[in-house]
Structures are given as C-alpha cells and as structure tokens.
Image: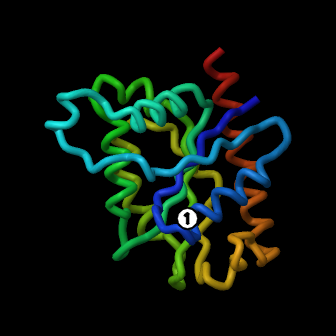
Amino acid sequence: MPAIVGLSGSLRRGSFNTALLREAAALVPAGSTLDVRTLHEIPLYNADDEAQGIPDAVARLKDAIAGASGLLLVTPEYNNSIPGVFKNGIDWLSRPPADIKRIFAGRPVGLIGASPGGFGTVLAQAAWLPVLRTLGVDLWTGGRLLVSRAGGVFDEHGAIKDDAVRQQLRLFLEGFSAFVASRQKDTR
C-alpha cells in the first residue's frame, strides 16, 4: 500500500495549498494513505544551528518522508517562483548532505499547487524542477494540477466547491498513487 507524505509549502492559516492537501488526503485512492504535513515548526536554515544538531521538527519530518513510499509537494507561487519558506524546508531536509539519499534520492515525488492568480502555480512548479533534479527524486510527470483562481475554488472551510477541480485532483492522485505503487514493486 503506497504511503505518501504530503507537504504544504504555505504557513498561512487559510492557505489554499494546505486546503488542497487536506482535500487530497480525503480523495486518495483506496489502498493508499496520505499523511498531511506542514512546515510550521521548521526554523530558518542556519549552518551554525545545523552544527548544533538537526532540529527535532526537521528530524521528525525527515523520518516521516524516509518511511513513506512517495512525497507530494503542494506549492504556492510567490512572485512567479518558489516560496522561500518551502525552499527553506527542503533545504533543511537535505541536511546533512549525506541524508539526501535517505530522504530524496529515487523517491517518487508529485507536484501540485494552488494560486489566486490566473495561471495557477505553473512558474513555481517549473522553478522546482532544478531543485528536484539536484536532489535526485523520481518526479512523476504523468499528470499536472495547477489550480488557478483558488479563491473561487475553495469554500470558507477550505473544501473544494468546484467539481471539475475535485475531479482533476482525484485523477492526479490516482495516477500518482499508481506511479508510487509501481516504484515500490520495482525496488522489491
């Protein structure tokens, strides 16, 4: 059974991306699980702090990802690129460099996002590509989900009220879960 960790790249209480991730957890196909995670306790990266030891919140997130079959990154788009808080979290997860293999190398990764803008998170998702390539992930490119005009997609409680977006999310999750499951079989 594919166990997937989903990581929202937003800290905002009313985050469209955290709402999208929660909806994904509710729609994940039977036989798969999706563990919803955020970056709320992750400090700003500082090599001096790293020298004192990996913070507990970072270690817990690293262990969750290492124990999962796949990773779903749910990215906002700020100023046409990757949000700083999300990049900071990934930077922490890649420390020390010897841990990159345990956390990222060969791990199936999916990438989705929501934005109030008209193009969804197309530029942020593109900006993630060199980072994910450097980390050596197995990026699933069999589907895309770029939720645009997110203010009209979610209700006041963070539930998707747009049936077309809900169906797109369901199809994305079916494809990504199948990809993760196929990679589990490949490593046996």
Residue 100 on image: x %, y % = 36, 29
Query: Where 39 falls versus 144 (above or below)?
Result: above
Query: Where 125 falls versus 25 (above or below)?
Result: below
Residue 167 on image: x %, y % = 80, 66
The one nearer the camera, 90 or 118, is 90
Report helix, strand or loop for mark 1: strand
Q: Quadrant of the N terminus?
A: top right
Amino acid marked by disc 1:
Gly
Residue under pointer 1: 113
Residue 30 on image: x %, y % = 85, 41
**Where on the picture, by quarter, is residue 79?**
bottom left
155 lies left or right of 37? right
44 lies left or right of 72? left
Q: Residues within 10 Å of mark 1 (few under 14, many from 20)?
A: many
Residue at 52%, 55% in the rendered image: 8
The one nearer the camera, 97 or 168, is 97
The one nearer the camera, 51 or 86, is 51
Residue at 49%, 30% in the rendered image: 106
Seen as rendered, the residue at the extreme left is: 48
Residue at 52%, 79% in the rendered image: 119
76 lies left or right of 90? right
Residue 46 on image: x %, y % = 19, 43
Residue at 64%, 64% in the rendered image: 19
Q: How is the image coloured?
A: rainbow
